[in-house]
Amino acid sequence: MKCPYCDCDDSRVIDSRDVNDGVRRRRQCLDCNTRFTTYERVMPASLFVVKKDRRREEFSRDKLLSGIRKACEKRPLPVGTVEKLAEDIEDELYQLGRAEIASSLIGDMVIERLRRLDNIAYIRFASVYRDFTDIDDMKQEIDTLVGGGAGVDGASGQLSLLPDERTKALAGGHRRRRK
């Protein structure tokens, strides 16, 4: 393993631990004595994604993670939630046992999980994935979420997408009165 500090090729393993889907190794460079951590994961057989235009490209966990991160940016989600979501989707894709997966299947898996996780992240992802052409398309999707037609669990602890009547009444009661 090459040292990330001095590029020396010699290092020794100080500690190894099993983590979720691989092994975490703590290493020490034999040249500069600096310690660093590496992660090893078993790479399953190649999985290809079939795009809308019929092109094929190798599945990229980083690309999946990037798209989910963009949708969840600045949302009050627990640490590790986005990574766990991507990991679950990747695991499910490999468990299908197919060499090729349609990009629409991956998008559907992401959008379904985001719908349950966070309404705002869901709308952000849906606006790109479903290619909303105008504000009416987005409004219709929001109305579906607010109306409960999308199967969102109201007790999930999500922040509300739009204020309900009680919230509006409370907000109105806190306004300053002019004399």
Image (spheres, grey):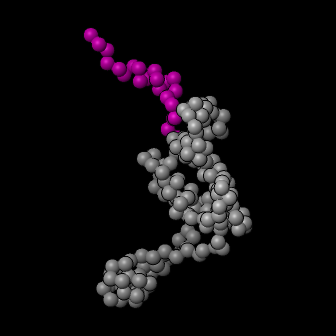
Q: Residue at x 52, y 63 (%)?
A: 62
Percent position of residue 60, x then y: 57, 64
Check residue 98 for magenta coloring: no
Dominant SS of magenta comes to loop
Q: Residue at x 37, y 78 (%)?
A: 4
Percent position of residue 176, x then y: 31, 18
Which quadrant of the rendered structure holds the C terminus?
A: top left
Q: Is residue 133 left or right of residue 30?
A: right
Camera-side residue of 68 and 149: 68
Q: Do we see residue 116 in this rendering?
A: no
Examine the image and state in which quarter residue 148 appears. Answer: top right
Percent position of residue 150, x then y: 65, 38
Q: How many marks?
A: 0
Percent position of residue 17, x then y: 50, 76
Vertical arrangement, residue 65 with respect to residue 128, above or below: below
Vertical arrangement, residue 142 with respect to residue 177, above or below: below
Which quadrant of the rendered structure holds the N terminus?
A: bottom left
Examine the image and state in which quarter residue 31 appears. Answer: bottom left
Q: Residue at x 52, y 54 (%)?
A: 67
Check residue 172 for magenta coloring: yes
Vertical arrangement, residue 1 with respect to residue 52, above or below: below
Q: Do we see residue 87 in this rendering?
A: yes
Camera-side residue of 168 and 63: 63
Of all residues shown, which one is farthest toward the top?
Answer: 179
Which segment is the magenta one? Answer: 155-179
Q: Residue at x 66, y 54 (%)?
A: 52
